[in-house]
Image (cartoon, grey):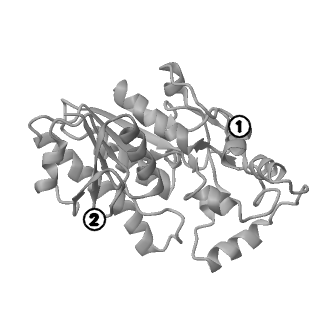
Amino acid sequence: MNHVVIAGGTGFVGRALAAEFLERGTDVVILSRGGGVVEGATTARWDGNPEGEWTSHLDGAKAVVNLCGAAIANKWTAAWRDEVYRSRVEPTEALGKAVAKSASPPKLWINASGVGYYGNTGDTSLSEASPAGKGFLAETCVDWESACLEAPAPRTHKLVLRLGVVLAREGGAFVEFKKIPCGGIGSGRQWISWVHLDDVRRMVSWAVDNPFDGAVNCCAPDPVTNAQFFRQLGSRRGLPPLPPMPEFVFRAAAAAMGKEASVVLEGQRVSPVVAQARGFNFQFPDLQSALDDLL
């Protein structure tokens, strides 16, 4: 069969991936708890149970892509930390059980992860070979990835996609960043490992065509500091040079909006070593080209 299955595919990344495959003539099945509809795709209801009618869609699939996970930007109360963790690990474990039982399992399982895997690492340059970091996000990513990579599904390639900050015209962090006129946030020295949404689309379809196992950093080869990012963004929008936003101001604003400030005040300097070594070429390898396209 010529189809891919996308779990958690109703967000802006999932919809972009669905569009990518549909444009390539590949059928798309969206696994959704709420029954959300993606134009051109088939929707199958999935409640996170490893059994049910939805599992039949795995048979003969070219790939299954798992994007399930609650937003990390919300304030990290104890309840929300639990939701962030469970909404990632539990669906991944369920998928692993279903893939293992499939009579004709997908050739490739791509499971989302994040560059938060590496923790808050300052100026250290990181590759896929770098160790996992410390803290809530890093520890969540470790268990999230393990649920995929250690699943008993030997007939399926398993790849974890460590996503950077995805820049898109609609949805995600970029929409929020455009609302903040400043020359950086906090010290401005924290790194932003970013990727254009079109390159996420291209990397996923490239991996489906060239399946392999392990981890791949899905971020552009041009990580920038927070200050560099906001200065380039302001310049591209025709704004004059602006001072940075003090950390205490940003923390207060984030708290008022029910957001988690540390997501922006911490960072990682990540390079896509594996993808480039395997021949993947970025359409938007530097921030200026990405901003030119997005704006």
Mark 1 → mark 2, Cα distance in angstroms: 36 Å
Residue at which label 2 appears: 35
Amino acid at the residue labelled 2: Gly
- The answer to which image quadrant residue 62 occupies is top left
Amino acid at the residue labelled 1: Ser
- The answer to which image quadrant residue 284 occupies is top right
Q: Residue at x 80, y 65 (%)?
A: 245
Q: Residue at x 69, y 71 (%)?
A: 251
Up-down relation of residue 86 to residue 80 (above or below): above
Q: Element type at marker 1? A: helix
Can you give x and y, in whole percent of width and height, for residue 126 in the image?
58, 34
Q: Element type at marker 2? A: loop
Q: How many marks?
A: 2
- The answer to which image quadrant residue 186 occupies is bottom right
Q: Is residue 78 left or right of residue 260?
A: left
Q: Which label was assigned to residue 289?
A: 1
